Every structure is written in structure tokens, then in C-alpha cells.
């Protein structure tokens, strides 16, 4: 597969979401937003050397008041990828920024598969954001707690490309 095939997959995915035209740029990059404004943008990057794609989102800065608790919970979720759909988290050393990423091969991938990967990724981004904030950031009345539970409103996220 090549960049042109990756662009075609993204174009087909965007069309299924109601947006026409090229989404992935000639540089192999694009950014999408989700219907929920508190969920950070998802950056998408085509990686030519190994014909893969990377989804990436920055959750925010991890503060010291809950750092150990949050990192412990993230490590439990990472154990054998038991609760993450293969999504990983990382922490930048210079700024203490928490990120979520998912890298996957484009070999034999369909637009439907890509859409499922993206939906799973956005769900994980939402869970980590809730874990960090202790609740949905724009909804103090949310029933979500620091254990990373996602309320029913997140089960059908709408993507805006």
C-alpha cells in the first residue's frame, strides 16, 4: 500500500461520515475532531516506511497531585492490552504531557476496519481523559469516576472530519 491508498481509505471513511473530498494531505497527515468538544483532536499520520498509520492524541499535562494514581490505573489497563484495544499511553519527559497513540498496519485494511480502529481509539481517548479529569470535563454531573468508567453518552461518538 502507498500514500495514495492510505488517502483513498481515509477518503472512504470520511465519505461514510458525511464529508467528501481528500482528508489525508499529501504529507500523510490530518487531524479530526469529535462531536464532544472536551475530547482532544485526533492526529492521523501515514508512515510510509512500514505502510502503517498512527493515531495520536494529547490528553493534557499530568499534574503531581494524582500522578501516581493515574499512572497506576493506566498501567493496569495496559496489562496485556486487556482494557485498551491495543491503544498505548505515554508520558513526555520534558512537559509531563500524557498522550494516547495507536499504530497499525494498513495491509489488507478496509475503510470499515479503519473506521472501527478510529472509533475504538476515540473511545480510549475519552476513557483516559475521564481518568485524568476524574469526570467528563464539561459535565460536573457526569456519573463517570476516576476508575475510567465511560458513561453511555460515549458509546456512540460522532466523528467530525
Image (spheres, rainbow, N blue to C red):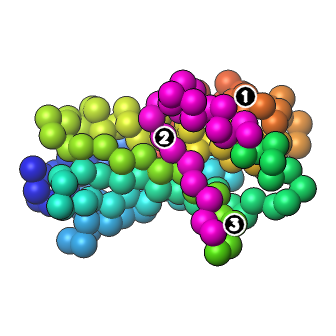
Q: Residue at x 68, y 73 (%)?
A: 95
Front-most of residues 119 and 95: 95
Quarter of the image with the C terminus is: bottom left
Q: Which residues are magenta?
A: 72-93
Picture coordinates of residue 12 (x, y %)?
22, 44
Q: Secondary structure at mark 2?
A: loop
Q: Earlier in the sequence, mark 2 or mark 3?
A: 2
In three-dimensional space, the C-alpha distance between marks 2 and 3, rounded to whole angstroms, equals 19 Å
How crowded pointer 3 is (Cα within 10 Å; few <14, some 14-19, many 20+) is rated as some
Front-most of residues 55 and 155: 55
Q: Residue at x 54, y 24 (%)?
A: 82
Q: Residue at x 24, y 72 (%)?
A: 27
Picture coordinates of residue 118 (x, y %)?
41, 41
In three-dimensional space, the C-alpha distance between marks 1 and 3, rounded to whole angstroms, equals 24 Å
Q: Report if residue 74 lies within the magenta region.
A: yes
Q: Residue at x 45, y 35 (%)?
A: 86
The dot on residue 96 is 3
Residue 33 visible? The answer is: no
Q: Secondary structure at mark 3?
A: loop
Q: Earlier in the sequence, mark 1 or mark 3?
A: 3
- Would you say 76 lies left or right of 146 here? left
Front-most of residues 55 and 20: 55
The dot on residue 69 is none
The dot on residue 87 is 2
Above or below residue 19? Residue 31 is below
Q: Earlier in the sequence, mark 1 or mark 2?
A: 2
The residue at which mark 1 appears reads as 149
Q: Secondary structure at mark 1?
A: loop
Q: Report if residue 22 lies within the magenta region.
A: no
Above or below residue 109? Residue 133 is below
Amino acid at each position: 500500500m502507498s500514500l495514495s491508498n492510505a488517502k483513498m481509505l481515509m477518503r472512504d471513511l470520511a465519505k461514510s461520515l458525511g464529508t467528501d473530498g481528500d482528508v489525508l494531505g499529501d504529507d500523510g497527515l490530518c487531524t479530526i475532531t469529535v462531536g464532544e468538544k472536551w475530547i482532544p483532536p485526533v492526529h492521523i499520520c501515514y508512515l510510509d516506511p512500514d505502510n502503517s498509520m498512527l493515531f495520536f492524541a494529547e490528553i493534557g499535562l499530568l499534574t503531581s497531585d494524582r500522578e501516581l494514581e493515574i499512572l497506576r490505573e493506566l498501567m493496569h489497563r495496559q496489562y496485556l492490552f486487556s482494557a485498551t484495544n491495543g491503544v498505548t499511553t505515554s508520558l513526555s519527559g520534558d512537559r509531563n504531557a500524557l498522550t494516547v497513540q495507536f499504530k497499525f498496519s494498513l495491509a489488507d485494511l478496509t475503510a470499515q476496519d479503519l473506521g472501527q480502529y478510529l472509533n475504538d481509539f476515540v473511545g480510549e481517548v475519552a476513557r483516559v481523559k475521564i481518568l485524568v479529569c476524574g469526570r467528563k470535563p464539561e459535565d460536573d454531573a457526569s456519573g463517570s469516576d476516576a476508575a475510567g468508567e465511560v458513561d453511555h453518552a460515549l458509546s456512540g461518538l460522532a466523528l467530525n472530519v
